[in-house]
Image (tube, coloured by chain):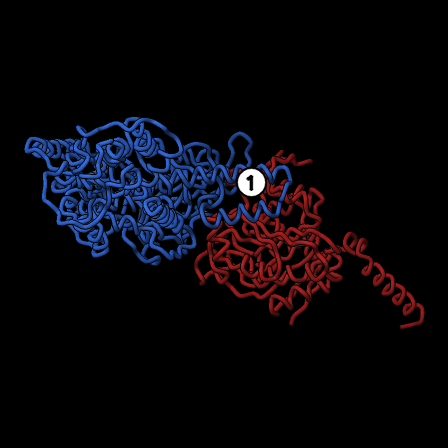
Chain colours: A red, B blue
Amino acid sequence: MDRRTFLKSAALVTGAGMIARNPLLAAKSAPGVVIVKNGSPREMVARALEMLGGISQFVSEGDYILLKPNISWDRRPEYAATSNPELVAAVVRLCLDAGARKVLIVDNTCNDARRCYKNTQIPEYAEKAGADVRFVRDSHFVDTKIPGATSLEHWLIHAEVFKVDKIINLPILKHHSLPGLTIGFKNMMGLLGGNRGRIHRPFAENIVDINRVIVADLTIVDAIRVLRRNGPSGGNLNDVEEMNTLIVGTDRVLVDAWSARIFGTDPESMDYLKLAHAAGMGEIDTHKFPAQQYNF
Amino acid sequence: MKKIQKTTLRRTVQLLFLGLFILTVLQAGYPFQPWIPPELFLWADPLAALATQIAGRFFDPVFLIALLVLLSPLLFGRAFCGWICPLGTTIDISDRLFTKKKNRSTRRYRPLKSILLITIFFFALLGVQISWYLDPLPILWRSLGIFGMSFFYLVTDGILSGLYDLNLLTDTVLNLQDSISIRFFPLGTPTFTNLFLPFLIFITILALRKISRRFWCRNLCPLGALLGLLSKFSPFQRIVAEKACTSCAVCQKKCKMDAIEDDYIHTEKSECILCLDCQEDCPTDAIRYGFRAPLAMRSATDLSRRSFIGAGIAALLGTGFLSLSALNPHKTDRRLRPPGALPEDDFMERCIRCGECMRICATSGACLQMVFLETGLEGLLTPVSKYRLGYCEYNCNLCGQICPTKAIQPIELAEKQKVKIGTAFFLTDRCIPYRLNENCIVCEEHCPLPEKAIKLKEEEYEDLATGEKRLIGYPYVEPDLCIGCGICENKCPLEGEAGIIVTREGEERYRL
């Protein structure tokens, strides 16, 4: 290496470092996805957020945070139909430690909410960590216009979505027969009211439309236990694979795309991801945008 | 002052038992960890115990509690009616709150309740249980448990939702709403069909006050008649000091039960509910209550031979009428019974329409519904699963855990998850993929079985108009896997009738 090359690369590294340290620039210019493997849920999420520049990138002093895990089904955590409760608790603690004023957890469940909230163990863990866990009710949803919608002009959306400072999406990676997989985009259905079965038609357009108005600032995909078949409700432990992985990032499309890749599905085969990419919501090409990886 | 204390004591006891009754109603929730059995008052109900066990030809030791109540008149007459019966207390409360009507004598209607009682027994002997129509304890249980709680929920949730909309006390409101949810109802507004009939029965019982005090207890209540039978042997009774009595008639005019004879000295013991009011009202303190050797005397509950035979004939005709109007259960395929339900005949003989199963149903106020005439005249107000309103939660077996007469058997969860309530069928004229050749999968996605009973058959569809080709998942049911829980029918996104329905095909009833 001659002196010129050295100086050039030194300048580049310093510049890159400065860009990386600037949250505004870092979040927008370089869509970062990190993949962390083989740690405890707590270690993995802490590590992932560190790699993305620290929790302070996402949570400011006094923020009101909406955390959206998947509590949809009346299943115990080991069935991998719902988000990992330890992971949820870890995220709640990180937010509160970073100065969040309040962390709200809600989900419009598919099974009886009382059963889902009990058997998924998410409320139990999250409340211990300091979160406010709430049931949803019909009266909590407001009919909301969706600007730029191509299919779903308006829908009933949880009122708190519009009151919070930040939204953190915490889906679990699962098999699902319609899009093939359910990851971050579909998890937002838990903030909708009304006859949600209607959303399935046309699925890709509608799921993209709801993510136009419910914008997650950070997506943490739980691939600790992954439901490979009979999703999204599961119920058979033989369908569950321990992958011990988190996929974390701010680019919603890219996070879902990388999660699909980890699952073994080509993101380009998933209609909603293509649509979301075309709508400028994020990057889909996992080859062009590699993920930073860390293995414990 | 001592006298006042006695009626105050009685009122306190009444309120305590009403409170206990309400507590039993409140036990029916999720998670189901009762510290008083919700069935307590129904197990203690001798009318329900006798009518169901005679009609259903079975013995359940839990009804030995009812024996205590049945034999209590041998010591204390109809004290159960005056001190314990929560419907009696409800009538007394509504009396104080809503009416200042005169108290008329209704003596000539007295035998009515005995005729009703004996008719119920004749029916039971012929294998038909009709006691539920007039049994005060199931009447009150379903009144409080079903529409009482629903009204409570509507009002409180209405107020709280209003506050939430106005952004007032948001945290407090959400906390309160959640504690109501946890204890009483899940999400959304409880929906109960055919509420008007039980509501009408309840309101009529209270409205009979227009005629007299405790008109129901005096003339109609078959449980009162049953307890009255042994009351004439009760040693504890109203005792009047004849010398002190001035025949002022205050006691007779005010008597809730019209139990005081025209000489103001003698009491009709099969009517007297030992409320002690007359002791308090007597201006000369001539009345006291105490033990005295019971003189067997003619009782107002004694029936003439004519009414006895009449009741027998009525039961015979009624049973015949019911069996003639019974629907063939194998052909009327939409009447789905909860998992663990006994075969239809046994089920009908045991079901006392208390509403406990509907109250505790996981999707409370939705899945289990009271039917009107859909299951025949005999099946009036029995629970039927209405899957367009709710569905049977895969991990729930609470209806069987709570049924006081075991019309729905208390089966283990693992067993319940295998019981076939019915089988799902696609209506391909309605179902979205079949009709519109578009993907839907909502039913498949919700199917709770470890191996889904709804599967997708992927086929390429070519739109003839545009030439566009697309891959469609056409759903179909594996009948051997399907347990008929109905979540598919419930969640089908179509408006009105679903594209998939559950019928009684393959239904399994619990065999004793």
Identify the subunit bearing mark 1. Answer: B
B343 and B79: which is toward the camera: B79
Structural crowding at the residue carrying mark 1, measured as other residues with C-alpha within 10 Å and reported as few (<14), some (14–19) or many (≥20):
many
Q: Position of residue A135 (x, y in %)?
A: 54, 48
Q: Amino acid at mark 1?
A: Leu
**Residue under label 1:** B160
B417 and A164: which is toward the camera: A164
| Mark 1 residue element | helix
Query: Split into 4 quadrants, where in the image is the C terminus of chain B?
Result: bottom left
Task: Determine whether A19 is above or below B503 in the image.
Answer: below
Kindly tell me whether residue B304 is visible in this rendering. Answer: yes
Q: Along the horizontal axis of the image, is B143 left or right of A272?
A: left
Q: Quadrant of residue A93?
A: bottom right
A180 and A174: which is toward the camera: A174
Q: Position of residue B444 (x, y in %)?
A: 44, 46
> Residue drawn 54% across and 55% down?
A174
A103 and A192: which is toward the camera: A103
Kindly tell me whether residue B374 is visible in this rendering. Answer: no
Task: Determine whether B468 is above or below A37 in the image.
Answer: above
Residue furthest out toward the right: A3
Q: Along the horizontal axis of the image, is A24 left or right of B183?
A: right
Residue furthest out toward the front: B243
> Residue drawn 84% across and 61% down?
A16
Q: Position of residue B486 (x, y in %)?
A: 38, 44
Q: Along the horizontal axis of the image, is A15 left or right of A197?
A: right
Q: Position of residue A29 (x, y in %)?
A: 79, 53
Q: How many marks?
A: 1
> Residue drawn 49% across and 41% down?
B188
